Image: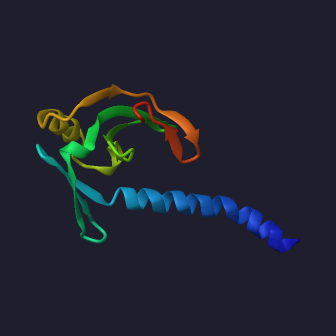
Amino acid sequence: MRLGLILFLSLPFGALFYMYFIVLLKTTKSYIITPDGIEVINLLTFQKTAISKKEILGFSTSEIPYKIGNFKEILIYLKNGDKIDLMQFAYFNFKKIEPALIDKRYDFLGYEPYIWKWVNSRVYKFDK
């Protein structure tokens, strides 16, 4: 009986730890935007990955509502269905990202409202 209660009470903490770990992994990357593509640098492993401009469908802007306010987000859509989420609070130079994408002639897909799908996921407007 006690073991079941302990397991039941530990589920929310496990879920919170999982979501924190996923956010940590997503926000430990640096992006360099060039006319030919986007270079991704993982700050934990120091690995570099290049995404060719041919692989990028475009980008959109969005806002995520939190209790303390709304945070802006830029979503970069890849042609293979993957997405790169760039959150306002995760990058010091966030205000420079959208102008850099426009300057380098990446397709702006438009604004998309944030629609919750599940606890840690959302509905994406520009999915194929």
Q: In the depicted view, which residue is nearer to us: 106 or 54?
A: 54
Which residue lies at the image location 24% right of the left edge and 68% below the top edge?
47
The N terminus sits in image quarter: bottom right
Q: Residue furthest right?
A: 1
How many marks the image carries: the answer is 0
Image location of residue 24, percent across then percent down: 41, 60
Looking at the rendering, which quadrant does residue 8 occupy? bottom right
Residue at 28% x, 49% y: name it.
91
How has the structure been colored for display?
rainbow
- In percent of width and height, residue 116 lies at 55, 36
Query: Percent x, y for residue 7?
Result: 75, 68
Instruction: Judge left or right: residue 113 versus residue 41.
Output: right
> Which residue appears at 84% of the width and 72% of the height?
2
- Residue 104 at x, y percent in the picture: 12, 37
Image quadrant in which the C terminus is located: top left
* Closer to the camera in the image, 127 or 108: 127
Image position of 115 (left or right of 90): right
- State the residue at coordinates (26%, 42%): 56
Which quadrant holds residue 17?
bottom right
Seen in the picture, residue 6 relative to 69 is either above or below; the reply is below
Q: Is residue 126 above or below residue 44?
A: above
32 left or right of 128 in image: left
Q: Residue 62 appears in which quarter of the rendering?
A: top left
